[in-house]
Image (tube, rainbow, N blue to C red):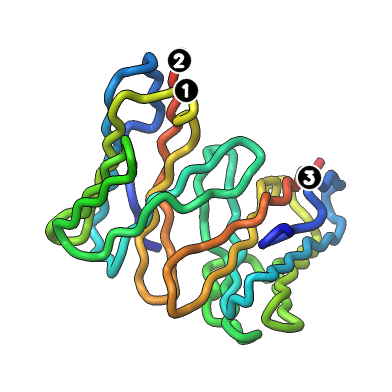
């Protein structure tokens, strides 16, 4: 069973479109994250939710809106996609009291 | 945003050689982790170091946390092709994990 699963794995879309990426974890973790990995492989945190509450919101454009319907799910919706949004988006989870981050396989977004 | 600089950025070595990767910051972290990421996959945790000066060994990998908890190093002895991948350090402050700039290692058979 996949611990942290993201869908879709690949997403190719036109500028200006709206798209969503979904993430689910079956590890019983209470904290989930979205990270963006750029072409230079730098992993930058975007958002974090603990028990469905937003606890970290880094400097991310308002076009990005996370939603956590429950502890096991964290989705990312992106409005009005721009070329610079092209990247691999990783979902991760952990127990707040523990250290290890468990990552999904990533969702590669390409904006044309 | 906390910045963790890793060096070198790229490393290509022959099988059997030793190597060291460095992770430096001006910030103090409560813990520091090392992850390895393979193409098409997410990063996977290798080790967590918590105490300043701590040294941890994982088979051929040796991890050290700086005394001031601002920097760390990863030493690999007798590198093997299976060690190929992107190595990322990550500093932890509370809820946040700040990742380093990454070191891409290629071990040539």
**Place of residue A11 in the rendered image (x, y in percent of width and height, measured from the top left):** 82, 47
Q: Which residue is mark 1?
A: B81
**Place of residue B74 in the rendered image (x, y in percent of width and height, measured from the top left):** 29, 41
- Relative height, residue B52 to residue B79 (above, below): below
Residue drawn at (71%, 72%) of the image: A74
Q: Which residue is mark 2?
A: B108
Q: Dots 2 and 1: beta carbons under 8 Å? A: yes
Mark 2, chain letter? Answer: B
- Relative height, residue A55 to residue B78 (above, below): below
Element under disc 2: strand
Residue drawn at (61%, 35%) of the image: B39
Element under disc 3: strand
Quadrant position of the N terminus of chain B in the picture: bottom left
Residue drawn at (42%, 24%) of the image: B80
Compared across the picture, whether A54 is left or right of A4 comes to left
The verdict on a common chain for dots 3 and 2 is no
Mark 3, chain letter? Answer: A
Say which of marks 3 and 2 sits in front. 2
Q: Which residue is mark 3?
A: A111
Mark 1, chain letter? Answer: B
Compared across the picture, whether A49 is left or right of B83 comes to right
In depth, the one of A17 and A24 nearer the eye is A24
Q: Dots 1 and 3: beta carbons under 8 Å? A: no
Say which of marks 1 and 3 sits in front. 1
Q: Which mark is residue B39?
A: none
Residue drawn at (43%, 64%) of the image: B97
Compared across the picture, whether B107 is left or right of B91 comes to right
The answer to which of marks 2 and 1 sits earlier in the sequence is: 1
- The total number of labels drawn is 3
Local packing at callout 3 (Cα closer than 10 Å; few below 14, some 14-19, many 20+) is some
**Place of residue B87 in the rendered image (x, y in percent of width and height, measured from the top left):** 43, 40
Cα distance between the residues tagged 1 and 3: 34 Å
């Amino acid at each position: 069973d996949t611990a942290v699963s993201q869908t879709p794995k690949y997403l190719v879309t036109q500028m200006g479109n709206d798209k969503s990426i979904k993430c689910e974890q079956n590890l019983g973790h209470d904290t989930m994250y979205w990270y963006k990995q750029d072409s230079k492989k730098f992993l930058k945190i975007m958002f974090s939710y603990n028990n469905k509450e937003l606890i970290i919101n880094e400097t991310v454009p308002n076009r990005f809106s996370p939603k956590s319907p429950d502890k096991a799910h964290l989705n990312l919706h992106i409005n009005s996609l721009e070329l610079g949004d092209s990247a691999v988006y990783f979902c991760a989870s952990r127990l707040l009291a523990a250290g290890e981050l468990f990552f999904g396989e990533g969702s590669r977004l390409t904006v044309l | 945003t906390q910045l963790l600089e890793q060096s070198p950025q790229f490393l290509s070595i022959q099988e059997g050689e030793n190597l060291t990767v460095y992770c430096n910051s001006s910030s103090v972290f409560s813990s520091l982790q090392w992850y390895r990421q393979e193409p098409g996959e997410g990063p996977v945790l290798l080790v967590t170091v918590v105490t300043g000066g701590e040294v941890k060994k994982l088979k051929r990998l040796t991890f050290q946390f700086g005394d001031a908890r601002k920097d760390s190093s990863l030493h690999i002895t007798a590198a093997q092709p299976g060690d190929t991948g992107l190595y990322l350090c990550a500093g932890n402050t509370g809820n946040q994990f700040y990742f380093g700039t990454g070191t891409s290692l290629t071990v040539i058979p």
